[in-house]
């Protein structure tokens, strides 16, 4: 504000109130001195223009006056004695207030005031000019001076030759009063303009401050009401003025966006915590279950090989199969909880996908499921971990096959980002689709809708893809099938690449 606030006490509190009142519109307050400077510049330029106009106008009038004086003095200049010149000069000066008129002979001697010397007149007569006008601006006076040559006219050719030089006349016209009056009028006008503009800007400033505080108060009340009613509650726009309504809507959008971001971060942290817990669990399982299971499996195989009873052999084989299933679950859990960092190498995408699907085709064909592969032009090689991406594709196809069960189609497609950078692999099936209430849980560990499932297949897919800096998305409608998108950016790209909208 430009002033030092009081140190303490009531004056300090009053100062804080005034400062807080003016703070929102401080920018507007800065405009006042800027406009004052602009008005001062306007005043200086206006004075210059007005003074120039006054001098031009009076210059024309002075030229006419001097010519009129020359015409009236001509008969007296032609007279032999020239005795009537002083009286005529005095009479002419009385008729034109503020005019100072003098007459000189052709030798430069004064005729109207004998004791007046004018060396500039002699120089003018010698110059051969007919007229000369100048403006002299002193510290406190503005004088217009003029000189005109007096020549013999046709009416006095009897005693003088035509055009003969008879003398010269000089005039001085004091314009100080006219210029001073114009400047005073400009000062008054400028003062009124500045005062009016200051009042207008200050009034606008105070009105803006009042409106701003009113809008902010309404927004605060609206926010308090919304907080009391719940995070999802809104405030009717009719309760707010237009400005407050727009600000409130913008703030609400900002808060909602921040809330969604916080929820996403919380979900990610929760997922990370689950991974850490599963890692500890998997390590314990590997030590406490997997190793003993290997011994039990070996014993069961020995018993199966030693018996000749067909029913017992079948029973032992079922036990071995169940032990293999348990061992596979532990293996999946270990791989999910503590996956190795991807060993990226330039892998031919078409060859990787074809070799991955080749192992699945026989079992799928037995169930009447057709498996197709399409690799778009220009996919070529891409930096991948062959083993991890093979497992991703295998798990997605196996998940699609479990959804179809029998007689259906699975289509695998690979393409690049529109800019040619990242890679998108999609797995589409024509199964029953995924219910909306289930869609958000399918990537959670141990979540499954099948009685025999472990709930780790899609969780492993998500973990491995995220290890590659990518993400997995799903589109599904009940009765229309599902499509899973594996979106992998190039290693030097930002992980958030284009979404599945680019897939056909």
Image (spheres, rainbow, N blue to C red):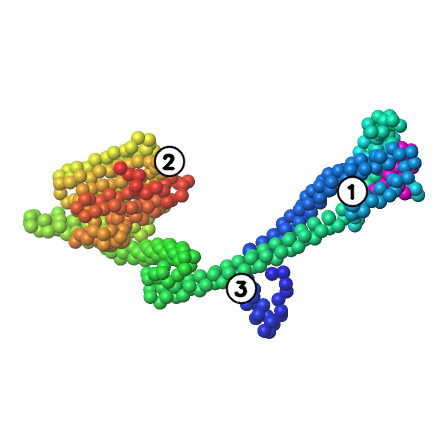
Q: Depth check: 475 or 188 in front?
A: 188
Mark 3 and mark 1: Cα distance apart in space: 57 Å
Element at label 1: strand
Q: Are the two marked residues, 3 and 1, in contact with CB atoms closer than 8 angstroms?
A: no
Q: Quadrant of residue 60?
A: top right
Query: Residue at coordinates 60% horizontally, 61% vertically from top-left?
Result: 1
**Image mark count:** 3
Is residue 317 shown to the viewer in this render? Answer: yes
Residue of label 1: 144
Q: Residues within 10 Å of mark 2 (few under 14, many from 20)?
A: few
Residue of label 2: 419
Mark 1 and mark 2: Cα distance apart in space: 81 Å
Is residue 108 shown to the viewer in this render? Answer: no
Which numbered disc covers residue 21?
3
Q: Nearer the viewer, mark 1 or mark 2?
A: 1
Q: Nearer the viewer, mark 3 or mark 1?
A: 1
Q: Give the vertical position of 217 relative to 313 (above or below).
A: below
């Amino acid at each position: 504000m430009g002033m030092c606030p009081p140190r303490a006490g009531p004056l300090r509190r009053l100062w804080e109130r005034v400062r807080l009142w003016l703070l929102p519109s401080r920018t507007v307050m800065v405009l006042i001195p800027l406009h004052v400077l602009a008005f001062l510049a306007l005043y200086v330029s206006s004075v210059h223009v007005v003074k120039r106009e006054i001098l031009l106008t009076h210059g024309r009038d002075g030229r006419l006056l001097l010519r009129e004086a020359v015409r009236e003095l001509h008969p007296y200049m032609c007279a032999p004695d020239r005795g009537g010149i002083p009286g005529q000069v005095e009479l002419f000066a009385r008729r034109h207030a503020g005019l100072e008129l003098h007459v000189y002979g052709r030798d430069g001697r004064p005729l109207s005031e004998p004791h007046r010397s004018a060396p500039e007149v002699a120089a003018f007569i010698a110059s051969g000019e007919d007229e000369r006008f100048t403006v002299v601006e002193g510290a406190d006076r503005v004088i217009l001076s003029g000189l005109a040559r007096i020549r013999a006219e046709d009416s006095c050719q009897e005693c003088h030759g035509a055009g003969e030089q008879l003398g010269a006349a000089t005039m001085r016209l004091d314009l100080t009063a006219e210029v001073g009056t114009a400047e005073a009028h400009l000062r008054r006008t400028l003062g009124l303009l500045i005062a009016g503009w200051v009042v207008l800007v200050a009034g606008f400033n105070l009105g803006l401050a009042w409106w701003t505080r009113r809008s902010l108060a309404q927004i605060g009340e609206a926010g308090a009401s919304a907080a009391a009613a719940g995070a999802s509650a809104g405030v009717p726009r009719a309760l707010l003025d237009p400005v407050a309504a727009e600000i409130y809507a913008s703030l609400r959008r900002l808060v909602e966006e921040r809330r969604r971001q916080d929820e996403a971060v919380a979900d990610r942290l929760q997922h990370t915590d689950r991974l850490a817990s599963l890692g500890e669990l998997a390590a314990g399982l590997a030590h406490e279950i997997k190793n003993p299971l290997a011994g039990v499996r070996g014993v069961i195989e020995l018993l199966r090989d030693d018996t000749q009873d067909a029913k017992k052999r079948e029973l032992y084989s079922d036990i071995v199969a169940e032990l293999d299933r348990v061992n596979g679950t532990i293996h999946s859990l270990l791989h999910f909880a503590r996956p190795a960092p991807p060993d990226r190498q330039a892998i031919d995408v078409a060859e990787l996908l074809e070799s991955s699907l080749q192992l699945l085709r026989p079992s799928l064909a037995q169930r009447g499921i057709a498996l197709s592969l399409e690799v778009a032009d220009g996919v070529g090689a891409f930096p991948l971990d062959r083993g991890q991406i093979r497992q991703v594709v295998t798990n997605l196809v196996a998940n699609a096959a479990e959804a179809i069960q029998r007689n259906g189609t699975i289509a695998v497609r690979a393409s690049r980002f529109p800019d040619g950078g990242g890679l998108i692999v999609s797995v589409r099936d024509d199964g029953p689709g995924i219910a909306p209430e289930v869609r958000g849980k399918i990537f959670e560990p141990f979540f499954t809708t099948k009685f025999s499932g472990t709930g780790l297949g899609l969780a492993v897919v998500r973990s491995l893809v995220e290890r590659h800096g990518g993400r997995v998305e799903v589109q599904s409608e009940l009765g229309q099938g599902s499509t899973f998108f594996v979106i992998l950016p190039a290693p030097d790209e930002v992980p958030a690449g284009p979404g599945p909208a680019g897939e056909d």
